[in-house]
Amino acid sequence: MSTQWLKDAVFYEIYPQSYYDTNGDGIGDFNGIIEKLDYIKSLGCNALWINPCFDSPFKDAGYDVRDYKKVAPRYGNNNDLYRLFGEAHKRGIRVLLDLVPGHTSEEHEWFRQSQKAETNEYSNRYIWTDFCFQPAKGMGFIGGESERSATYALNFFKCQPALNYGFLKPEEPWQLATDHPDAIATREAMKDVMRFWLDHGCDGFRVDMAASLVKFDDEKKSGTSAIWRNVREMLDAEYPDAAMVAEWSDPPVALRAGYHMDFYLNHPGGGYASLMRDYQKGFSVNDGVDNSYFRKDAPDRDINRFLEQYEAWYKDTRDIGYISMLTCNHDTIRPRFNMEMDELKLAYAFIFTMPGVPFLYYGDEIGMRYLDLPTKEGGYYRTGARTPMQWDSSKNLGFSTGCADSLYLPVDPAADAPTVESQQDDPASLLNTVRALLKLRHEEADLQADGEYETVCAEKGKPFVYRRGSLLLAVNPSGEKLFADVDADDRQVLFVLGMADAHARRLAMGPQSFVVLK
Ligand code: NOJ
Ligand code: CA
């Protein structure tokens, strides 16, 4: 296996609609990403994940793919994307595309064929029952829209019919077994899509709803996992450098299914949510107490809410793949929503010094705000985290030369909207703190994906202290000076935010501080 590059990989997620518009139509494009590759490199990121950029009616921002092998004209053409791969590679940057294997758009040609009354090659490509009034048990379904006398199952929104990978224990005549040739044909069609992009220079995939292939009877995910292991065999044999990251958020299962990385996502009640988004109740915002670990004024912070889940996963998976920590993604409220710049510095310092492969969401490096906006392209509350990147003080904050009305989404109207330009020359800015942290990560192998992790002090009321290989790290997000009994006297300070002092077997951490000791 030669996905060795993941050991020192730091990803940057780009929502292409909103990154940089080079032709003034108000929508970001491939040429825009190419123009900003040097900026991305300057952050210390050496890999990209680009959200779906394929032909689509955009009822779910491109997660409703109409043609897997053709890019959406609003971003450019296929050759522009191939050029992006080449320009990224020249700078040592790898590029992952977003693979959506669980569903297509209802406008995909496979689905149009599948809707026909007459049986054809695509009749079983999607999950259909065998009668116009019969729903598929346990799943959302649509009836009355097709010539075929049956209902079809949905994987997400109404525009996203579920692809058919078969069922583990078929009970109804319309349920195919997972080894039925038509179920296997769906898997092979997805491999064909992967080969197409890999042959053109892409370096792998972020996989949408990776757990969703085999439907409701696959509780332990054995059916879905078998499909991914088969895909991984193909990659190892034909594209050994290619990497896959799952949208699964269950690393013990996803990594055993053959994924190289799995995201640690913002699931309600999960450990990751307790770090920066404790204000959430389920997926909605509540007005209750915010005990997010990195908030300065959290009344009752406790890092153990994170560690209980994380450490179990880490110990179970450290030899088989990577957990990916992220600042945010296109489905999540930006961390600036409830956190100030100094709080973000500490949160990012933590995320970028943890094992596994970290992901930075575009705009988080300057602390872009979450905007309160009406829904766009099926975004709903997610829309506010998808606004244009803020480059400088020029028109539309440097995102586009088009008129403000033509923009995909509005830019932050605040007078103090953060921009790259306004932070560029300040060594203490969030932007330059991100750069310094990533530089340190690239310099110290112990801080990278494989470096060992151990909790040293997780007691309430004390700084959180952890070990990465031979390095000792500590963070104090509170507004008070805190102490931990650790013997760090002869260590050298490699990096510090705020004040930290090791003396007489006591580590003193000033208000809102972070330190890396060697
Ligand atoms: C997860 C994606 O991240 C999200 O944006 C999308 O709406 C759903 N999957 C459906 O594809
Ligand atoms: Ca454009």
Image (cartoon, rainbow, N blue to C red):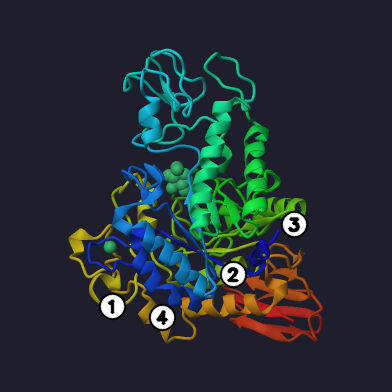
Q: Measure how far apart labels 1 and 4 are at the Cα level.
A: 12 Å
> Considering the numbered disc 4 on the image, is that residue within a helix, a strand or a loop?
helix
Left or right, residue 67 beside residue 192: left
Taking depth in this image into account, of 327 and 245 the one nearest to the observer is: 245
- The answer to the question of whether label 1 and label 4 lie on touching residues, with beta carbons closer than 8 A, is no
Can you tell which of label 1 and label 2 is closer to the viewer?
A: 1
Q: Earlier in the sequence, mark 2 or mark 4?
A: 4
> Considering the numbered disc 2 on the image, is that residue within a helix, a strand or a loop?
loop
To which residue does mark 3 refer?
318
Q: Measure how far apart labels 3 and 4 are at the Cα level.
A: 37 Å
Can you tell which of label 3 and label 4 is closer to the viewer?
A: 3
To which residue does mark 2 refer?
477
Question: How far across and down, in percent of the image, does residue 471 sit?
Answer: 75, 76
Q: Earlier in the sequence, mark 2 or mark 3?
A: 3
Q: Measure how far apart labels 1 and 2 are at the Cα level.
A: 32 Å
- The answer to the question of whether label 3 and label 4 lie on touching residues, with beta carbons closer than 8 A, is no
Categorize mark 2 by other alpha carbons within 10 Å: few (<14), some (14-19), many (20+).
Answer: many
To which residue does mark 4 refer?
423
Q: Earlier in the sequence, mark 3 or mark 1?
A: 3
- Location of the N terminus by quadrant is bottom right
> Considering the numbered disc 1 on the image, is that residue within a helix, a strand or a loop?
loop
Seen at 25% across and 67% down, the residue is 23
- Answer yes or no: disc 1 within 8 Å of ligand 2: no
To which residue does mark 1 refer?
393
Can you tell which of label 3 and label 1 is closer to the viewer?
A: 3
